[in-house]
Image (spheres, rainbow, N blue to C red):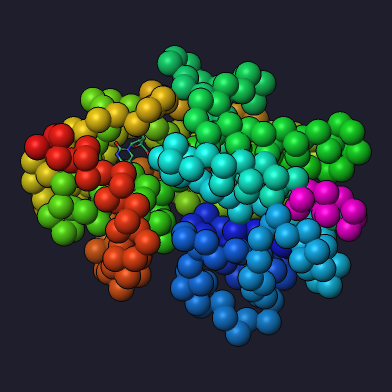
Amino acid sequence: MKILVTGGAGFIGSHLVRRLVTGGGHEVVNLDALKYSGNPANLRDLEGDRRYRFVHGDIGDQPLVERVLREHRIEAVVNAAAETHVDRSIMDPGTFARTDVVGTGVLLEESRRAGVSRFLQVSTDEVYGSVETGSSTEEAPLVPRSPYSASKAGGELLVLSYWTTFGFPVMVTRGSNTYGPNQYPEKFIPLFVTNAIDDQALPLYGDGRQCRDWLAVEDHCAAIDHVLLRGEPGQVYNIGGGNERENLVVAERLLACLGKPAQLIRFVRDRPGHDRRYAVDCTKLHALGWRPSVSFEGGLNATVEWYRTHESWWRPIKSGEFRRYYEEQYRTRLNEAG
Ligand code: DAU
């Protein structure tokens, strides 16, 4: 197939592009705006591969999207382009609405007009809101509680409306917390690993007892690939790793992997509106034939090892735009914690 992957220079996007090209033998066009977390180095190994093309641009740029879809005779679209970090959505909600709702709308409409035969929207389990007990099936109500998750919910509702209204063959995946190599170090695991390598404090929000279901990036991409080929139009599929862990437990475990002291952990002021727990019921995707294959402990060890041996990837990132963000997000919190 000829597939357009948007956001393919990002974390999940780059792993997905590599899988589709080298594993699936598909031709892939990667449309990426190269904002702060998009990194061409993530796909350096595919440069020169005739099955892979990179286009620099935004999913909200209608003339560009129209041209890319037609010029490359795209058959399927995977929208992995998004603003994704909850803390940044609290600082600057407008950017999230623009990319995750309006940008998605532009890509969707142009894909419909171009006669694309499958459109997969990469969404998130955060649209269900905080799940105190049990787990969310795909029919659970959407109760997003941050500007990030509300924007993702808006984007996916727009996508689903195209099935009802136009019969346009869309699918939505709702993935859980994803981790692995090449993840921008604003997120919990890469932030804590890289801080710990430098003997810096690990800023743990609130009481550290919030719970996330950890999903290895290779499992997440295998699930997206599976749904793209075998999913039913108009359907939503949860993707979870089956690895619920409290943040404090994850922080302690990665410190142990690195041989660093638990005293690096600092309990800091909580994220506003912090969701306590996410948990998805994946019966529907299991019935379609996908299962996660990476154990959390194995995946976390491998991820810690990757950051330990790839300082040339993350050190330049942590010294640039990231430093300003880190100051704004953490300086007062860390000072308050003493
Ligand atoms: O559930 C899927 C979602 O997982 C994705 O849709 C989002 O794009 C992704 O960012 C992630 O959202 P979270 O808010 O759960 O991920 P984050 O890495 O920001 O935080 C994970 C947990 O760790 C959360 O309970 C907040 C906590 N945390 C995070 C950071 C960055 C801390 O305690 N300290 C921190 O400095």
Identified at 69% across, 68% down, the residue is 28
Query: Between residues 172 and 291, which one lies in front from this camera angle?
Result: 172
Reply yes or no: does residue 108 show up in magenta.
yes
Q: Residue furthest bottom?
A: 48
Identified at 67% across, 72% down, the residue is 55
Reply yes or no: does residue 260 show up in magenta.
no
Using the rendered image of the protein, determine whether residue 233 is visible from the camera's viewpoint: yes
Quadrant location of ligand 1?
top left
Q: Residue furthest top?
A: 133
Q: Quadrant of the N terminus?
A: bottom right
The relative height of residue 42 versus residue 186 in the rendered view (above or below) is below
Q: Position of residue 72 (x, y in %)?
A: 81, 71
| Total residue callouts | 0
Query: Which of the 4 image quarters holds residue 138?
Result: top right
Q: Which residues are magenta?
A: 106-115
Using the rendered image of the protein, determine whether residue 241 is visible from the camera's viewpoint: no
The relative height of residue 9 versus residue 82 in the rendered view (above or below) is below
Q: Position of residue 118 (x, y in %)?
A: 80, 50
Query: Which of the 4 image quarters holds residue 127?
Result: top right
Q: Position of residue 123 (x, y in %)?
A: 61, 40
